Image (tube, rainbow, N blue to C red):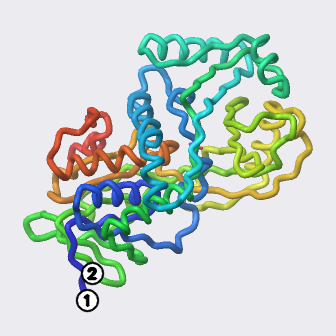
Amino acid sequence: MSVKSDVIIVGGGVVGAACARELTHAGRSVVLIDDGTISGEAWRASAGMLAPQTEAEEGDHLLELGLAGREYYATRTEELSAATSVDIDLFRGGILKAARDAEEAEMLKRRVGWQRQHSHHCDWLDPVEMREQWPWLGPTEGGLWAPGDGSIDPVALVKAFRADAEARGATLIGDRIHRLDLQPDGHVLGVTGSSTYLGDHVIIAAGAWSGRLDGLPRPISVEPVRGQMIAIPWPEEALPGVYFGYGIYVVHRAGEMWVGATMEHAGFDNAITPAGAGFLLSSVSKLFPSVAGTEPIRQWAGLRPGTPDGLPIIGPEPRAPGLWYATGHGRNGVLLAGITGVLIQQLLADEPPFEDISPVRPDRFWSW
Ligand code: GLY
């Protein structure tokens, strides 16, 4: 039996679900297909930071995209929660990035400087101000304070995107898609899993697994980057929030401190390791000395879809009309999911995208 729709989305994680939400709001008929049995998806493991200013390097294309991504949640949360009754736990209280040494302090001061030159609000705090405001932190050489950064609950967000899309008519299907089907002239025909699905458009949003489909016109430059996380009790004396420092970040979630994350090239192995937990525990103990000696309550890992230049792959496949990519979001899947949905909706409608997408265009890696 085959199912026919306007748009087929392969992958129901945070990016695929966001695309389904935006496309159904634009009146498209959407089939969202996800193999719910896969373990190691990035969104399930994610802490859900919205940290464009904390994480952006100077001149980084991700800054503008990330700011738009953060703004998307600020403006859509009420609408999403009214439509779905899901609380996505949007936190907009700012993120602190502490400098562990003089070299990091200089780098963060430069970051504050160039962001301010671009009219983005962020501050540099010297070590005395740091001690006054966050006395429970370990020794620092100062810190970058990004008052607009924050966090969101990724699992709730996916639930909300899916529910909102479904309420607008999307069909959610559990299946493992293994092949893209093209017509003899190269146009998209559909995809095949345990059934065949026909559509005018196919969007590949399968995260680290995006390149594993047979029948793609070219290889997709996405590879898994493992991120291990641990949870420990949130220390009583510390203000709940989001903090970076000593090579890790921590996010407050339901009374726990989620600490992440490693960046490991281990193929599709999403195993947790003693070395991963050891690195996270020793680093968080420098940032929050009172947690030294604490045992993790849980440890888990996810596979981010990494690309060679760290930017996502969003847009059309020139060789197969009707084929679109929304993948390769690396460390920024949650932050960029909503605006990826908006961009994909605009591109399918042949509307000018609200951001310049040339830095993320799919054919930048493949000239053959
Ligand atoms: N967004 C942070 C990470 O991927 O670890």
- From the viewer's side, name the closer residue of 119 and 77: 77
Ligand 1 within 8 Å of the CB at mark 1: no
Q: Indicate the secondary structure of the residue bearing disc 1.
A: loop
**Mark 1 and mark 2 residues within 8 Å of each other at the beta carbon:** yes
Q: Residue lying furthest right in this view?
A: 293
Mark 1 and mark 2 lie on one chain; the one further toward the N terminus is 1
Q: Residue lying furthest bottom in this view?
A: 1
From where the camera sits, is residue 201 visible?
yes
- From the viewer's side, name the closer residue of 267 and 177: 177
Measuring from the top left, give residue 127's x and y in whole percent. 76, 13
For the residue marked with disc 1, what is the amino acid? Met
Taking the spot 27% from the left edge, 37% from the top edge, the residue there is: 357
Q: Is residue 20 depicted above or below 110 in this figure?
A: below
Taking the spot 42% from the left edge, 21% from the top edge, the residue there is: 59
Quadrant housing residue 28: bottom left
Taking the spot 34% from the left edge, 50% from the top edge, the residue there is: 341
Measuring from the top left, give residue 80's x and y in whole percent. 44, 54
Taking the spot 35% from the left edge, 68% from the top edge, the residue there is: 32
For the residue marked with disc 2, what is the amino acid? Thr
Measuring from the top left, give residue 52's x and y in whole percent. 50, 32
Mark carried by residue 1: 1
Split into quadrants, the picture shows ligand 1 in the one at: top right
Ligand 1 within 8 Å of the CB at mark 2: no
Q: Is residue 98 left or right of residue 355?
A: right
Q: Is residue 345 left or right of residue 308?
A: left
Residue linked to disc 2: 196
Q: How many marks?
A: 2
Measuring from the top left, give residue 119's x and y in whole percent. 43, 15
